Image (cartoon, rainbow, N blue to C red):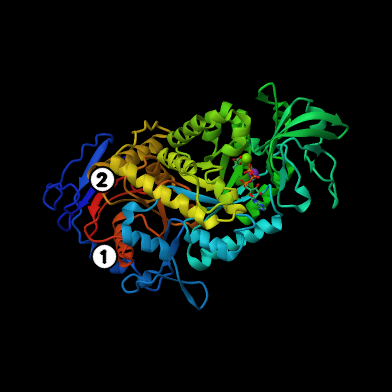
Amino acid sequence: MSQSLQLFTTYSRSRNPTVPTHSDLNPTHTRRFPVTLFPKLALKASLSSSSSSSSSDLDPSSSPVLVSGNGAGGVLSAATQAYAPPVLVSSDSSSIEVDSVKEAELKENGFRSTRRTKLVCTIGPTTCGFEQLEALAVGGMNVARINMCHGTRQWHRSVIERVRRLNEEKGFAVAIMMDTEGSEIHMGDLGGAPSAKAEDGEIWTFSVRTFDSNQPERTINVNYDGFAEDVKVGDELLVDGGMVRFEVIEKIGPDVKCKCTDPGLLLPRANLTFWRDGSVVRERNAMLPTISSKDWLDIDFGIAEGVDFIAISFVKSAEVITHLKSYIAARSRDSDIAVIAKIESIDSLKNLEEIILASDGAMVARGDLGAQIPLEQVPSVQQKIVQLCRQLNKPVIVASQLLESMIEYPTPTRAEVADVSEAVRQRADALMLSGESAMGQYPMKALAVLRSVSVRIEKWWREEKRHDPMELPDIGSSYSDNISEEICNSAAKMANNLGVDALFVYTKTGHMASLLSRSRPDCPIFAFTSTTSVRRRLNLQWGLIPFRLSFSDDMESNLNKTFSLLKARNLIKSGDLVIAVSDMLQSIQVMYVP
Ligand SMILES: Nc1ncnc2c1ncn2[C@@H]1O[C@H](COP(=O)(O)OP(=O)(O)OP(=O)(O)O)[C@@H](O)[C@H]1O
Ligand SMILES: CC(=O)C(=O)O
Ligand SMILES: [K+]
Ligand SMILES: [Mg+2]
């Protein structure tokens, strides 16, 4: 076996004076980097003129090969590379200019300051139209989430179709995440009303009876037949994780009379938990399946629609994730739907490591989590989950109430901004909007707040060099996996030490890209992959700018092609220092853009 670390040091022009210079990086001096991890260290100075090979790599007649973007994407036809600054996508006879936002950002601020933290938006009544979806995509939405608790499958299908059309026509790579309902106890849909206000001291009836059109006043339907049997007089009933609270005062057959003790807004299908003697009552929930029969139908729907992620609510154990993954694999051989475990119950915390290991990512679902554990424990649990996910190389989303007040108001509270900053500082892969984007009055403003806070905090922490280095354990099961990990860890470290402008990774499955992301390097990671589904999936991971690119096993030609395409688009320039790694050739290459 020949596992070599190859350092191709191509020197083409004098070093940018703002970054450290290395006088021995030149055509006549090759330098052995202090890397001793590999059996054979082949150090090769590649002196060929990179620009000379570009013409043969770029066949003007070929179809679009390069699609860039970090939620704001674009398609660059090889034919346009030399001349055409406006990047065009031809989906029909007319051409549409795309990616103006991302490109403008990359060009104005340099790609060093692009946002690393990814943004997930829950789509609901206020954002389901094509124009609103486009505005969200332009505003930085990387993943659109649809919550199967709400709306019909037809409604969800139309959202998926619109997102797909947006991607095709405008060159975005917005991924779709389907979130299951789960079989927890929740309220009915309030007889069609958007919300209802419960005032202090009011008596409300929670009933397992279903009501057709005429729902009696102050009556709420509960979806679970055993509800009236399970609760006891004196129990505390929490709606939506404690946003509204009631005390159970009387049981009459299927009806449970409750007095409101903390007033608030009741929203359709809000979750219900009941507490007795200071802790949540969960015996019954423990017996309910994590994936209900309705969830299985929704999952079939998600597979048929080709969603990118399925997020499973109220995961209790790793088995359910493993089972779902094999179910998906059996149903859709070619698809690579990633399974995200939502951490929102006591059981999920008990089995945290196994669950995360079995999943393709996790969500800190603070809404329901805060209804199951004391609220003051939520911040430390969040930090723990975020750290563990990074160590195990799984993307992690911090969700719920990040900008809750923006459902009603155009400006966030200072406390909300601090909460968002903290999640960015913890270097979660992604932040999620829920009600703010699903049914709030200011979805675009809320997204803009996430975007600006992310960019600001990321930059501040980079400048301050305040990031704690994290111990990254070996996670691969084979020697070859371990080599990939060492290559990525070393490449990220070299990138920081040398102050390079970008890391490039050529990856078929996205694995090497995720390993680079795990190191949270100072520079952005340009991830080149040949399939659109992998590109969309990488859109959830910290610091990756995913591009679709047809590439070969010949790294030199890949690099030349990439340099030409990116330079034509003014995304990189001669003299930029780049470190490249790839799946195909286990190597680290350091070079200046010719
Ligand atoms: N497809 C939809 N149709 C109508 N309203 C929606 C839709 N999706 C979300 N909402 C509204 O936005 C609110 C917040 O959305 P979110 O997805 O966070 O849901 P949730 O019901 O709080 O539950 P969870 O996230 O725990 O599943 C919901 O309570 C609901 O009022
Ligand atoms: C997102 C979600 O499910 C929660 O916070 O409960
Ligand atoms: K859900
Ligand atoms: Mg939840």
Which residue lies at the image location 50% right of the left edge and 59% below the top edge?
137
* Disc 2: which residue: 6
**As drawn, which residue projects farthest toward the bottom?**
93
Locate residue 570 relative to residue 90 in the image: left or right.
left
Foreground of the two, 334 or 417: 417
Q: Secondary structure at mark 1?
A: helix
Q: Which mark is residue 53?
A: 1
**As drawn, which residue projects farthest toward the top?**
277
Which residue lies at the image location 66% right of the left edge and 47% below the top edge?
299
In percent of width and height, residue 160 lies at 61, 58
In percent of width and height, residue 320 lies at 63, 35
* Amino acid type assigned to the residue bearing label 1 in the image: Ser
Above or below 95: residue 397:
above
In percent of width and height, residue 462 lies at 31, 43
Give the position of the C terminus as an image quadrant: bottom left
Residue 271 in view, yes or no: yes
Q: Secondary structure at mark 2?
A: strand
Residue 116 in view, yes or no: no
| Residues packed near mark 1 inside 10 Å, few (<14), some (14 to 19) or many (20 plus) | some
Quadrant position of residue 154:
bottom right
Foreground of the two, 344 or 202: 202
Locate residue 175 relative to residue 26 in the image: left or right.
right
In percent of width and height, residue 481 lies at 40, 38
Number of labels in the image equals: 2
